[in-house]
Image (cartoon, grey):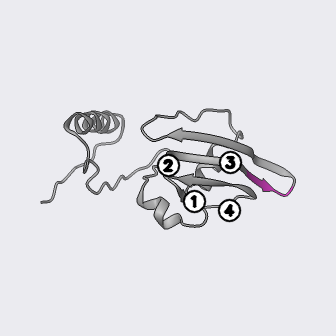
Amino acid sequence: MAAILTVGLTKRYGSLAALDSLDLEVPEGDVLGYLGPNGSGKTTTIRLLLGLIRATTGRAEIFGADCQGDPVAVHRRLAYVPGRADLLLLDEPTSGLDPLEEREFQTCLAEAHRRARPCSCRRTS
């Protein structure tokens, strides 16, 4: 099953195509860097995947759940952090990870912390 699947995903605002017929398949476990110049449709794609805006045509799925038809199921399987977030609320972010994956997550979190303003982290039991 694909983590992300889009077929002919299009978003138009009048005659302006913000995203034009995107076909994309990202297998589970893969890492995707979604790059492009300003105005190329990156943010539009993300908003469509999150179900925040409706596609003009086409479809999008996250782990087989329809992004437009069942956004609640989609949101259960993903986390979205927009650029320059001032606060991250993480609820058991390492649940289900093996020890190596948990260590990598902690390393990434520490790096993000070094780049950000000071914060305090508390663990509850």
Work out whether mark 2 precedes mark 1 in sequence or the reverse, and give the earlier one. 1
Foreground label between 2 and 1: 1
Query: Which contiguous range is marked in magenta?
Result: 10-14
- Within 10 angstroms of label 4, few (less than 14), some, or many (20 or more) residues? some
Work out whether mark 3 precedes mark 1 in sequence or the reverse, and give the earlier one. 3
Residue drawn at (42%, 52%) of the image: 79
Marks 3 and 1 sit apart, C-alpha to C-alpha, by 12 Å
Element under disc 4: loop
Foreground label between 4 and 3: 3
- Look at the numbered discs 2 and 4 and tell me whether their residues touch, using CB distance below 8 Å: no
| Residue 58 picture quarter | bottom right
| Residue 122 picture quarter | bottom left
Instruction: Please name whichever residue, 70 or 33, is drawn nearer the observer in this view of the structure.
Output: 70
Q: In which quadrant of the rendered image does the C terminus lie?
A: bottom left
Marks 4 and 3 sit apart, C-alpha to C-alpha, by 14 Å
Work out whether mark 4 precedes mark 3 in sequence or the reverse, and give the earlier one. 3
Element under disc 2: loop
- Within 10 angstroms of label 2, few (less than 14), some, or many (20 or more) residues? few
- Residue 109 in picture, x, y percent from top left: 30, 39
Work out whether mark 1 precedes mark 4 in sequence or the reverse, and give the earlier one. 4
The circle drawn on residue 67 is: 1
Residue 87 placement, left or right of 33: left
The circle drawn on residue 91 is: none
- Within 10 angstroms of label 3, few (less than 14), some, or many (20 or more) residues? some
Foreground label between 2 and 4: 4
Q: Amino acid at mark 4?
A: Arg
Q: Mark 4 sits on what residue? A: 54
Q: Mark 2 sits on what residue? A: 82
Measured along the vertical axis of the image, is residue 28 above or below residue 124? above
Marks 2 and 3 sit apart, C-alpha to C-alpha, by 24 Å
Q: Amino acid at mark 3?
A: Val
- Residue 92 in picture, x, y percent from top left: 25, 54
